Amino acid sequence: MDEQVDKSLNTLEILIAQLQSMWESIVSLLPSLVIAIAFLIFTWIVAKFATKISDKLTAKTSMRPSLRELIDTLVKIAIWTVGLLVSLTILLPDLTPGSLVAGLGIGTVAIGFAFQDIFENFLAGILIMAREKMRIGDYIKCDDIEGKVEQILLRETHVRKPSNELTIVPNSILFKNPVEILTDQQQRRHEVVVGVSYDTDLEQARTVLRNAVESSDIIDDGKPVDIFACEFNSSSVDFRLRWWSGATQRDMHESRDHVVRSVKRALDEAGIEIPFPYMTHIFKEPLPIASLEN
């Protein structure tokens, strides 16, 4: 019985000694903890002022708002990273900055492999924003993607298709592949091909076609209209008509509508025939019955 009491007392003494040792360790850490917390508060103040300074500097440039926000975020991350490293070193003296940096390096490599696609899109987004060639509101084509750019974010770009569907495109696709920016300039060249019968005087046809295109009030009068005889087709001599108009898709459709109607009216008035078999040149294969009915 006495032995059991002695064992219980010994266990209690060991427990009390361990608790006392832990308390002494906590008390000894208190000065370091207070200093570390004070340094974190100082880091917060520095990060806040640094962000304001960064905001003022970037506001004077022509950077996109999203790119300015990214720079502010990177400034905050850099300051907080240094502040946390210093605070940990103060709190745990055995933890050297070298070992922390080494640990962060190994962790960064592991995270990089795990989230390779995310980082790839992130970096592509930064580079797209930095070069500032593709703007919000531009109409673009990239592989099977076509539409109006609505938003450029760090990892993705939102493209609104002509049929009003929204396509969310990873930035790496837009960075790796050729992108046609159709609205990079206010004007772009449009064209249409029209055929006339073989018994037509081609010089007369050229004059009629030129007058028809130039009479349209939707084309750009400051740039030349090109009329080229381009091909001997099976039942017609084809002319390629080229003119300049607005760069948007609606401008393209409206100008083509005006030009096609003007050309048809002018050729009818001049008695110049557009051969009916010319339609087989436009549609290489016969249309299915269902398509004709629709």
Image (spheres, rainbow, N blue to C red):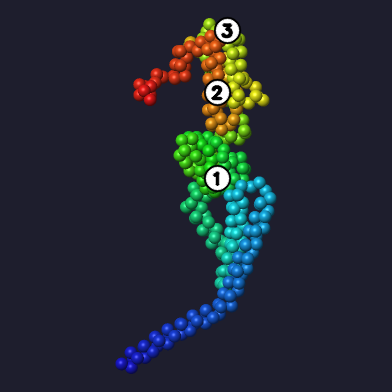
Question: Where residue 285 sits in the image (x, y, percent)?
Answer: 41, 19
Q: Which residue is mark 3?
A: 201
Residue bearing mark 1: 152
Q: Which residue type does callout 3 highlight? A: Asp
Residue closest to the far left: 1
- Which callout, 2 or 1, points at the residue further toward the start of the chain? 1
> Which residue does the image show at 51% across and 43% down from the upper left?
158
Expressed as whole percent of the image width and height from the top left, the position of residue 122 reads 54, 49
Is 54 on the left or on the right of 13, as rendered?
right
Q: Check residue 187 in the rendering and tell me which mark sits there, or answer none.
A: none
Q: Does 161 sit above or below residue 1?
A: above
**Quarter that holds the C terminus:** top left
Mark 1 or mark 3: which comes first in sequence? 1
Position above or below: 32 against 141:
below
* Tag 1 and tag 3, C-beta contact below 8 Å: no
Residue sitting nearer the eye, 236 or 294: 294
Question: Residue beneath label 2, please?
Answer: 258
Residue at screen point 60% across, 74% down: 35
Name the residue type under label 1. Answer: Ile
